[in-house]
Image (cartoon, rainbow, N blue to C red):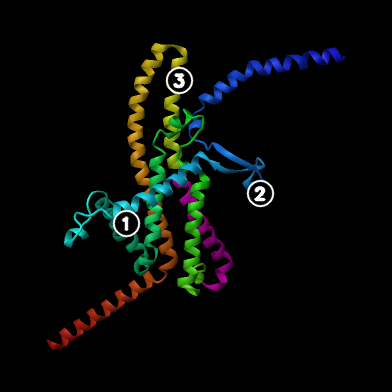
Amino acid sequence: MSAQIAEPQHAEPGGHEAAAPGHAAAEAESPLEHVVQHPLIERPASVGLLTPEGKITLFSDQIAMIALAGILLIALVPMLVRRRRGRSGIDALVPTGGANALEAICDYLRKEVAEPALGPHTDRFIKYIWSVFFFVLTINLLGLLPIPVVSQLFGTHIGGTATGNIWMTATLAIVTMVMMVVNGLRLGGKAYLAHFCPGPLLMAPLLVPVEIIGLIAKVFALAVRLFANMLAGHILLAVLLSFILAAGAKSTGLGLGIGAIVVLGSVAITMLELFVAFLQAFIFTFLTTLFIGMSVVLHHDDDHGHAHESASGHGDAADVHHAAAH
């Protein structure tokens, strides 16, 4: 009996050894390997749903990209801002080169995005709006660089798009929600609380939960929109590149033929990804500004209505005066 049990147990490791290369090859060819986070430093932890595997990631390739984006912004933005056409007179006030582009972007975000949504509170929040845009844009652009390929030459995995991680985008969205709620209470006070029940008090048990769900939905949409768009493009590129490896495993000629087609498609998709990197940074910034404006500018519609009624009143008075004169 013991011999019969021993034989399967002896054969089992051999089966695992035979299956291991195939399993490893499948993992190596998985396109998700180029997209998912690669932990570099982990520690055991138990924080409920936040640590389903019983460990927490202290440092990873995507965390490295977040830190790199912050360092680049801190180092490069002051250098660009100081670039001027001259050092004296009017020339010292005229930006040139990168400073000119940076000023144009900041001015556009202020005039076309922030002021229509934030109104008199634009100066209070414009620095946060600028910071969100350039931070998200820098992370998106870093994700397009072939940093993971270079880092693998040194035996590690650094790189990737941090905005393709839902934890990253959710953190940014939660920061925006805190800005919405805290500043809504600070600037609007009771008026902010009153907007959770826009109808009569008898309807409060129905309206208040709906408004709270709406607030959570805004944050959810803000996080998922950026995450999904940045993740989808990189998965598509990874899948296309995996076609070359799969075809090359069959034959060299087939690999070269498929490779030529895939490279052309990858170049086109990369150009699209570059456009999406700017577009998603702008959309995230626009929605952030819009949501904050909806929390702090509570009487904009009422004031506009009163102004319209006042203008109509003045117009009616002028008509009566004109008729009386005739």
- Pointers 2 and 1 in contact (C-beta within 8 Å): no
- Magenta portion: prevailing SS class: helix
Instruction: Write down the region rendered in magenta.
Output: 198-227
State the mark number for residue 47: 2
What residue is pinned by disc 3? 245
Give how far apart the Cα atoms at labels 2 and 3 are: 40 Å
- Residue at horizontal 34 percent and vertical 39 percent from the top: 274
- Pointers 2 and 3 in contact (C-beta within 8 Å): no
Among the two numbered marks 3 and 1 on one chain, the one whose residue lies closer to the N terminus: 1
- Pointers 3 and 1 in contact (C-beta within 8 Å): no
Q: Secondary structure at mark 1?
A: helix
What residue is pinned by disc 1? 109
- 27 to 141, vertically: above or below: above
Across and down, in percent, residue 130 comes to 37, 56
State the mark number for residue 308: none
Relative horizontal placement of residue 164, taking residue 309 as reference (left or right): right
Residue nearer the viewer, 180 or 81? 81
Can residue 210 be found in the magenta stretch? Answer: yes
Across and down, in percent, residue 177 comes to 49, 59
Residue nearer the viewer, 252 or 42? 42
Give how far apart the Cα atoms at labels 2 and 1 are: 39 Å
- Residue at horizontal 37 percent and vertical 43 percent from the top: 277
Among the two numbered marks 2 and 3 on one chain, the one whose residue lies closer to the N terminus: 2
Across and down, in percent, residue 311 comes to 26, 77
- 141 to 205, vertically: above or below: above
Which residue lies most toward the right here? 1
Q: Is residue 146 visible?
A: yes
